[in-house]
Image: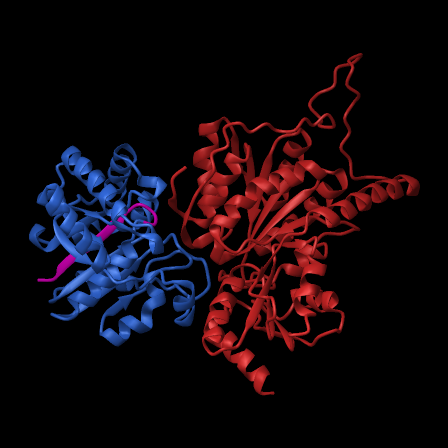
Chain colours: A blue, B red
Amino acid sequence: MRDYYVLLGGFGSGKSEMALNLALEKVKTGPCMLVDLDVINPYFRVSEREEMLNRAGIELISPPYSMKKIEIMSLSPRVYAAFAPGEGTVIFDVGGDHVGAAALGQYKPNFSRIPPENLNILFVVNPMRPVAADLQSAWGLMGKVEGVSRLHFTGIVNNGNMAEESDLTHLLAGYDLVKELSDKTGVPVWGTCGQQTLLEEFSAYAKEHGLEEKYIGKRYPVEILMHRSWAKYLKEGL
Amino acid sequence: MAKKLMKGCEAIAEAAIQAGCRYFFGYPITPQNDIPEYMSLRLPQVGGCFLQAESELAAINMVYGAGGAGARVMTSSSSPGISLKQEGISTCCAAEIPCVVVNMMRGGPGLGNIQASQGDYFQAVKGGGHGDYHMVVYAPSSIQETVDMMQKAFDTADKYRTPVMILADGLIGQMMEPVELKENKDLVLPEKPWAATGYTPGGKKPRSVLNSLYIETEDLDELLERLFARYAVIEANEQMWECYNTEGAEYILCAYGTVARVCKAAIRILGEQGIKVGLVRPITLWPFPTKAVHDAVVQDSVKEALTVEVSSGQMVEDIRLAVNGEKPVQFMGKPGSHIPSAEEIAERILQMRRA
């Protein structure tokens, strides 16, 4: 049976970055498929990393319009291949907010046939983004996303970051927010995401100041693959 | 306010609201839809009005109406949509309507593509609409700069009673960067005694007429004299540019918008090889910083200049006019949406050096 990861959350919460990292990790132990289900963003989408994903042996399913420079937002029939019996991991990278999550709703019958233990529906939170900066807005967004995606969250991810200017304070702000959000909704914290050195710094701080493990979850180190610095990402295309 | 991680389009919309903009009229087009989407959520919260018009033509004429009534108003679009707005922009210039127009450029001509481009330079600075006019054109190269510019854009529009354009490539709208928005609690909007806010018969205020039709030759002459006298003041006072590493440089890169950032990366690469290269970046494309460009390029140390654009060569014409044949000016760029890499730009400078 395949394991499924569906990454949802606010616009710019870091879903694509996490999706790429998760795919590169999972492909080491078995087949991995990455579904680009973003119907929102014309630029900065995982499909732009097709070459890198192909090199790593990850199967990418892109919408037919993606990177073809047209604007008809339609979904590939190949998305259904993600629900065929098989082994390994399937990752869905979904567009931001409830607007982007609406694309998932039509797959409800397919998702409901997947055993709960194989299904990870994750809400990615970055408190540095104004759209989900506090409990009220993050909680409100979570409800809207659940409504249109017709899926229930199984985990919350702390992805507090400020792009190139990320530091410990952003992960700590994320910790405070996911703690409140988890208490409010009963959805457990799946993990905390960040660049390796920042995560180590965060873990040390957590130990010293007694942050609760259940609000940290697994430490999930990510490498920045999507949003590169100017010099770097222009080298590999947009 | 503390820094936030914002997408360019969101940041532009929020900065406009902070600058006192309360009216937005537009029609959707990629890659700037996040601006109207954000405005549709935020403007009602601050007592403003967002309206999705039935077309670009309708939208720009609603801007004419709101601007004419003295409100701070903006519209945004991307290249093909801006073409549709040109008649209205020309009309706003003639009727001296302050307003802000954002163009998130995409590939053209025609419907082109939806990737970032700089193909609308000519349209923006050489008068995309009909008639003798100019408008102030700002070209930001980062989200923070765009945000800071929004306040200035509205102030400049009011100060000179003129439309102002923010000309950015699609990347500026779609990328995310940390940004600090300055809350403007003490914002006082200038008095606009000329605005058409209602006429009371027998009242003190004369009837306000905002018009672009001047049938009599003498009347049109008078309007144009007034406009061009004002343009001379704008040219004298409003030029903006950035000189980066230019003093004593061997080569000067000329670029605006996001390409200028790639140029800075190229300058670092060449610097590591002991080659001193500078950048002159026009921030206002009209008024064009002619003297600043001239002074940067026509230094004794400079061998040649290289203009880099995401077009087949548009701003390069103004660069050459500024340099006036005193140094060779080469061009690098491709039509469509090809953004050169820092390595490509560095390689081009190395080629020029070998030649």
Give the number of callouts. 0
Q: In the visual, does B162 lie left or right of B42?
A: right
Q: Can I make out residue B126 in this image?
A: yes
Q: Relative to the observer, which residue lies in front, B82 or A105?
A: B82
The C terminus of chain A: image quadrant: bottom left
For the point 67% across and 28% down, the residue is B69
The spot of residue A142 in percent (x, y) is 25, 40
Is B186 displayed left or right of B229 in the figure? Answer: left
Is residue A79 or residue B350 the one in the foreground?
B350
Residue extending furthest toward the bottom: B355
Instruction: Give coordinates of residue B334: x percent, y percent.
Output: 56, 73
Residue B230: x and y, percent?
A: 78, 43
Residue B286, horizontal then vertical, whole percent: 69, 53
Examine the image and state in which quarter residue B38 appears.
top left
Which residue occupies the extreme top position in the image?
Answer: B202
In the depicted view, which residue is nearer to us: B53 or B326? B326
Residue shown at 43% from the left, 43% from the top: B180
Q: Magenta residues, as a range?
A: A1-12
Name the image quarter holding residue B118.
bottom right
| Screen quadrant of the N terminus of chain A | bottom left
Decide whether residue B209 is among the magenta residues: no
Q: Is residue A186 above or below residue B293?
A: above
- In this view of the protein, can residue A191 be seen by the observer? no
Q: Is residue B119 above or below residue A122?
A: below
Q: Quadrant of residue B246?
A: bottom right
The residue at 50%/26% (across/down) is B47
